[in-house]
């Protein structure tokens, strides 16, 4: 291969490398922008490496219970809940008179929030979307799907561990055990079921995903 051919080949390789880097950057930026949405509000009471104790503010969940393994249940429930926030509901909002007042015949669209929560319920999975803080149980539109319920969650303290990686049963169990061990070491008491929280859309690369296990704990710490 001549010198000119080698230089041309080097340029081709360099162009391919640049294209790959740009593609990854576009995916990363897209995932970040896609999740630039309202998140559950909390204050960190204690931090220990990847573990945290958080105080969550009261909030409302739209929740549905489904059967299946952890991945199948998550996909099935996500689609059902997404239809609800996209307009598959009966709007019952009471709004003070302003101008203009808008109304859509298919129902009211609700902004997406994070995270998507998932917890085990007697062999099934309860999957939930947190509702925006601008809504209450009284102002949220009623779901058309009877399998979706709205639930008020009081302020509570949660132990949390954050990790990246695939949405798998293996990773869920692995980090749940890590968090449970840390809770025991800290002398805290588990007072509720674990919650699996996902913050990113499905197209996000596995190493960029923000996943968390959350477990309600007590007593309070100062």
Image (spheres, rainbow, N blue to C red):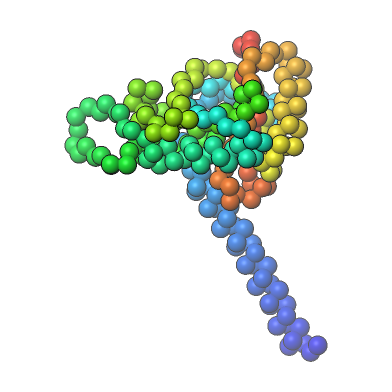
The residue shown at (32%, 38%) is 107
The answer to whether one can see residue 73 in this image is: yes
Answer with left or right where residue 32 lies relative to residue 138: right
Residue 76 image offset from top left, x and y in percent: 56, 40
Residue 194 image offset from top left, x and y in percent: 65, 24
Q: Quadrant of residue 135?
A: top left
The residue shown at (71%, 36%) is 169
Answer with left or right where residue 140 lies relative to residue 73: left
Q: Nearer the viewer, residue 197 or 53?
A: 197
Task: Give the vertical position of 121 relative to 15 (above or below).
Answer: above
Answer with left or right where residue 70 lies relative to residue 112: right
The residue shown at (64%, 22%) is 122
Answer with left or right where residue 5 lies relative to residue 65: right
- Residue found at the far right of this picture: 1
Q: Nearer the viewer, residue 46 or 83?
A: 83
- Image quarter in which the N terminus is found: bottom right
Task: Give the vertical position of 132 relative to 156 (above or below).
Answer: below
Residue 5 image offset from top left, x and y in percent: 74, 86
């Amino acid at each position: 291969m001549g010198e000119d051919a080698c230089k041309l080949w080097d340029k081709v390789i360099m162009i391919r490398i640049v294209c790959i880097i740009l593609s990854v950057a576009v995916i990363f930026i897209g995932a970040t922008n896609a999740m630039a949405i309202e998140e559950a509000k909390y204050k960190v009471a204690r931090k220990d490496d990847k573990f945290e104790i958080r105080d969550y503010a009261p909030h409302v969940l739209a929740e549905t219970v489904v059967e299946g393994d952890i991945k199948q249940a998550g996909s099935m429930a996500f689609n059902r809940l997404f239809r609800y926030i996209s307009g598959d509901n009966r709007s019952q909002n009471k709004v003070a008179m302003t101008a203009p007042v808008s109304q859509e015949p298919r129902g009211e669209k609700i902004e997406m929030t994070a995270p998507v929560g998932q917890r085990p319920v007697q062999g099934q999975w309860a999957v939930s979307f947190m509702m925006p803080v601008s809504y209450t149980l009284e102002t949220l539109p009623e779901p058309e799907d009877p399998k979706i319920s709205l639930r008020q969650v009081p302020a509570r303290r949660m132990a949390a561990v954050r990790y990246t990686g695939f949405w798998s049963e293996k990773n869920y169990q692995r980090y749940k055990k890590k968090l449970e061990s840390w809770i025991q070491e800290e002398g805290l008491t588990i007072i509720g079921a674990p919650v699996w929280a996902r913050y990113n859309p499905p197209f996000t690369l596995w190493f960029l995903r923000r996943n968390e296990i959350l477990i309600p704990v007590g007593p309070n710490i100062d």
